[in-house]
Image: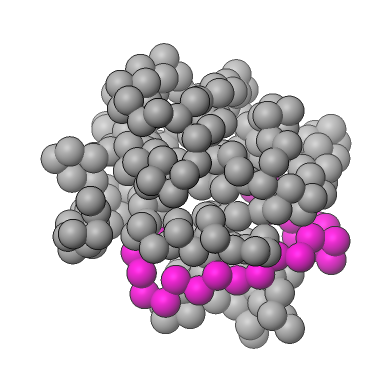
């Protein structure tokens, strides 16, 4: 299994902080950045290899990751057009590295250890959802029907929708089908949308199931308010953080 860590965005909603470093290097505690926590949990779960997509501050991110001494091997995939494209392009550029089961995480995602453990152990392709939360205004929602996810997007508010986060485990064949649709989108010039749009176009061929976090921490940091809220929740993990 290989991890995919998506870090090519500019993070403009974080304000001044992301004028100095990539968003994934924002701190969630005195001794953890978002991505140091992700990497530490991946290594704990036995993942030994990660593809890291990059945008601004690519050299700084590389130095930060190598300084963690995690034992993981990192493959860096720059997106030179990060300012004009979405991460669908970054995933397309990383496609040649992703020939195994894939754990895919957005670089601004903070989660409890159990969330990653459930994803990694899943025998089927799955996405993190939380049935205990109200539908968020700005974040992803998953539309679930007959036990399967049939669409993921920020604009999904109808029946069967549940709060979702961009934390996925894909079996190799399922990821290959998603990547084929991503490639089709990119080659048509549809580069400003979410990669989930490509999933939505091909969901019938990609069996993806909800993995319910049921109140466990799993949240993105998009702005300073998110950072304060998620950092407070992260501190509450206590002994689980070891």
Give left or right: position of 232 versus 9: left
Q: In the picture shown, does residue 26 fall above or below 130?
A: above
Q: Residues in magenta?
A: 191-218
Residue name at image x 35 percent, y 41 percent? 40
Q: Residue at x 34, y 64 (%)?
A: 217
Residue 123 image-quadrant placement: bottom right
Question: Is residue 139 in view from this perspective?
Answer: no
Q: Can residue 37 be spotted in the picture? A: yes
Quadrant position of residue 24:
top left
Q: Residue furthest top?
A: 59
Q: Position of residue 140 (x, y in %)?
A: 54, 62
Q: Is residue 100 left or right of residue 168?
A: right
Q: Residue at x 23, y 46 (%)?
A: 28
**Model colouring:** one colour
User: Which image quadrant for residue 145?
Assistant: bottom right
- The x and y percentages for residue 159 are 64, 85
Whether 164 is among the magenta residues is no
């Amino acid at each position: 299994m290989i991890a995919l860590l998506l870090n090519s965005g500019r993070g403009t909603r974080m304000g001044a902080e992301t004028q100095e470093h990539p968003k994934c290097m924002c701190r969630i505690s005195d001794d953890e950045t978002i991505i140091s926590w992700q990497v530490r949990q991946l290594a704990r779960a036995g993942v030994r290899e990660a593809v890291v997509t990059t945008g601004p501050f690519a050299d700084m991110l590389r130095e930060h990751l190598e300084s963690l001494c995690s034992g993981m091997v990192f493959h860096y995939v720059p997106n030179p057009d990060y300012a004009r494209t979405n991460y669908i392009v970054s995933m397309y550029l990383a496609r040649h590295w992703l020939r195994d089961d894939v754990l895919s995480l957005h670089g601004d995602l903070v989660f409890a250890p159990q969330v990653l453990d459930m994803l990694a152990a899943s025998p089927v392709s799955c996405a993190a959802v939380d049935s205990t939360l109200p539908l968020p205004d700005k974040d992803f929602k998953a539309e679930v029907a007959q036990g399967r996810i049939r669409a993921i997007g920020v604009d999904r508010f109808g029946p069967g929708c549940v709060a979702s986060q961009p934390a996925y485990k894909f079996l190799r064949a399922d990821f290959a089908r998603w990547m084929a649709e991503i490639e089709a989108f990119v080659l048509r010039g549809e580069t400003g949308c979410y990669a989930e749009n490509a999933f939505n176009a091909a969901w019938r061929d990609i069996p993806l199931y909800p993995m319910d976090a049921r109140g466990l921490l799993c949240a993105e940091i998009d702005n300073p308010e998110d950072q304060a809220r998620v950092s407070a929740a992260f501190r509450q993990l206590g002994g689980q953080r070891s």
